[in-house]
Image: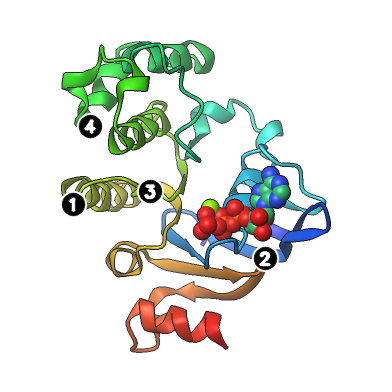
Amino acid sequence: MAVAIEFDKLTKEYDGVLAVDELSASIESGRITGFLGPNGAGKSTALRCLLGLAKPTSGSALIEGSTYGSLLKPLQRVGAVIDSAGFHGSLSAQRNLLIICAAAEIPDLRVMEVLTMVDLEDSVNKKVKEFSLGMKQRLSLAAALLSDPDILILDEPANGLDPIGIAWLRDLLRSLAQSGKTVLVSSHQLAEMQNSVDDVLVINKGKLIVAGQIDEVRQGQSLEEAFLRYVQR
Ligand SMILES: Nc1ncnc2c1ncn2[C@@H]1O[C@H](COP(=O)(O)OP(=O)(O)OP(=O)(O)O)[C@@H](O)[C@H]1O
Ligand SMILES: [Mg+2]
């Protein structure tokens, strides 16, 4: 199996706090990997290092063997939902995505396609500052899908989504993986993750706890039971 994403002794320290502590793990391509860990475990920090939004103190976080910053056309190869900031509140959803298209050399036609995919086609002209939490989350997902990237890095993408949105997200992740794309997705919704992911990566206090195929990690327990067993011992 080809490796799409690799953390190699990734360490990130903030003012004496080790947010990520020598994390080594490989994410296989064409699979959905659930990135799990308690609040403050270091998931977002590791994903930010992967996307070049935070600089590792030591070690590395690589996408197909390169740092995000040295990838050729990174916006076309990697889609990310990292937080719903980053949009211009006073501009419409459509205008925000058109700005990304211009930066990433993506045809403007794609904007309506992705807004329809995330069920925002009736809100294309609404200003983003008037969006609800779930609508902003859907817009973030639309932005991540704009370039039809091979690799998706999603930090709690289900945040704020209603049950219809969560079911839609599950189907979307599945169809992306079926078409050979790689998805690394963090979440606290373990019951949902149990039905959605192929592999699991669990960290706690910045350190790797367990990684592997979901059935190996669960060992017959629910993902929630297994998670609690791993992080509480
Ligand atoms: N910019 C920052 N400056 C200082 N400390 C930070 C910063 N970002 C994260 N941290 C610290 O790093 C640790 C890991 O935080 P991180 O946000 O990566 O955790 P997380 O696993 O994403 O948690 P959650 O599940 O709550 O989203 C925490 O102790 C946090 O306080
Ligand atoms: Mg986080």
Quickly name the residue at label 1.
163
Q: Cβ of disc 4 within 8 Å of ligand 2? A: no
The type of residue carrying mark 1 is: Pro
State the CA–CA distance, disc 1 to disc 2.
31 Å
Residue at 48 percent of width and 86 percent of height: 229
Q: How crowded is mark 3: few (under 14 residues within 10 Å), some or many (20 or more)?
A: few
Mark before the other along the chain sequence, 4 or 2: 4
SS state under label 4: helix
Quickly name the residue at label 2.
206
Mark before the other along the chain sequence, 4 or 1: 4
Please indicate whether residue 159 sits to the left or right of residue 82 in the image.
left
Q: How crowded is mark 4: few (under 14 residues within 10 Å), some or many (20 or more)?
A: some
Mark 1 and mark 3 in contact (Cβ < 8 Å)?
no
Q: Cβ of disc 1 within 8 Å of ligand 1? A: no
Mark before the other along the chain sequence, 2 or 3: 3
Quickly name the residue at label 4.
117
Please indicate whether residue 142 sits to the left or right of residue 87 in the image.
left
Q: Position of residue 70 (x, y in %)?
A: 71, 32
Q: Position of residue 189 (x, y in %)?
A: 35, 63
SS state under label 3: loop
Q: Where is residue 16 in the image (x, y as percent from the top left)?
A: 83, 58
State the CA–CA distance, disc 3 to disc 4.
19 Å
4 vs 2, front mark: 2
Rendered position, 91 above or below 166: above
Residue at 59 percent of width and 61 percent of height: 40
Q: Residues within 10 Å of mark 2 (few under 14, many from 20)?
A: many
Q: Cβ of disc 2 within 8 Å of ligand 1? A: yes
Mark before the other along the chain sequence, 3 or 1: 1
Query: Which quarter of the figure has residue 123?
Result: top left
